[in-house]
Image (cartoon, rainbow, N blue to C red):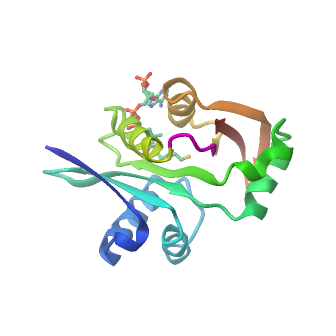
């Protein structure tokens, strides 16, 4: 049996947020300390938890509320055609992580679809590394996000900006 829970951080137990942070950390896509990630997760709008009864928590995701300065910088760096409207994108899809061994079974799609259902009608953006074929496919082909602007430098890699209106 599977259970997907979507909650505001304030409704989560501290241990749930710890498990969320651990899974995101294991996915290896984020260069933040656990404390900083926990602090930021507590500021998210929604957190999603995908439980597989026998194996516990196997996937997570979030609707984040980025700082406006950070968001504007992403749109500017990506040279997005939507840069002048970036303030309309108040929420960001992120921290999507499915445990190794459970990937490619539709769990990522289920998590993200459930999150998007909760924020239907609002403009939203997401970013991912340009070599993350799974996340790019999920955003672009499965969820009808479209890429905006061009690849931009983020730390040692290149990132892509995706938007959904
Ligand atoms: C990216 C990730 C969240 C996708 O979750 P998932 O459960 O493995 O993906 P799903 O099984 O739901 O697949 C969704 C779609 O992506 C496709 N897909 C999955 N992995 C893929 C890959 N490596 N390359 C190309 N397509 C891929 C699936 O075929 C599926 O396509 P469909 O909807 O057309 O059938 C997961 O692989 C993961 O946790 N990766 C590590 C962490 C990470 O990169 N997070 C994103 C940070 S921005």
Is residue 127 in sight in this rendering? Answer: no
Is residue 59 in sight in this rendering? Answer: yes
Left or right relative to 151: residue 16? left
The residue range painted magenta reads 120-127
Residue at 81%, 55% (x, y): give it: 73
Residue at 57%, 37% (x, y): give it: 132
Whether residue 53 is in magenta: the answer is no
x and y, in percent, of residue 111 in the image:
38, 43
Nearer to me, 21 or 120: 120
Left or right relative to 58: residue 73? right
Whether residue 122 is in magenta: the answer is yes
Q: Quadrant of residue 26?
A: bottom left
Q: Is residue 29 above or below residue 9?
A: above
Ligand number 1: quarter of image: top left
Nearer to me, 122 or 31: 122
x and y, in percent, of residue 159 in the image:
70, 43
The N terminus sits in image quarter: top left
Residue furthest to the front: 121
x and y, in percent, of residue 153 in the image:
79, 48
Nearer to me, 91 or 149: 91
Residue furthest to the top: 141
Q: Is residue 159 above or below residue 138?
A: below
Q: Is residue 141 above or below residue 38?
A: above
The C terminus sits in image quarter: top right
x and y, in percent, of residue 144 in the image:
56, 27
Residue at 60%, 61% (x, y): give it: 65
Q: How many marks?
A: 0
Left or right relative to 35: residue 17? left
């Amino acid at each position: 049996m599977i259970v997907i829970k979507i909650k505001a951080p304030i409704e989560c137990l501290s241990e749930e947020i710890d498990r969320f942070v651990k899974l995101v950390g294991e996915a290896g896509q984020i260069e933040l300390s656990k404390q900083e990630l926990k602090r930021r997760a507590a500021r998210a709008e929604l957190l999603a938890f995908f439980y597989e009864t026998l194996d516990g928590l196997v996937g997570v995701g979030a609707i984040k509320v980025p700082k406006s300065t950070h968001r504007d910088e992403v749109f500017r760096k990506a040279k997005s055609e939507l840069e002048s409207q970036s303030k309309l994108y108040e929420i960001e899809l992120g921290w999507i992580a499915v445990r190794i061994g459970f990937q490619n079974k539709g769990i990522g799609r289920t998590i993200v679809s459930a999150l998007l259902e909760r924020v239907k009608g609002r403009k939203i953006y997401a970013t991912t590394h340009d070599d993350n074929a799974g996340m790019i496919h999920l955003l672009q082909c499965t969820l009808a996000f479209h890429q905006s602007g061009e690849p931009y430098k983020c730390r040692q890699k290149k990132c892509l900006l995706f938007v959904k209106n």
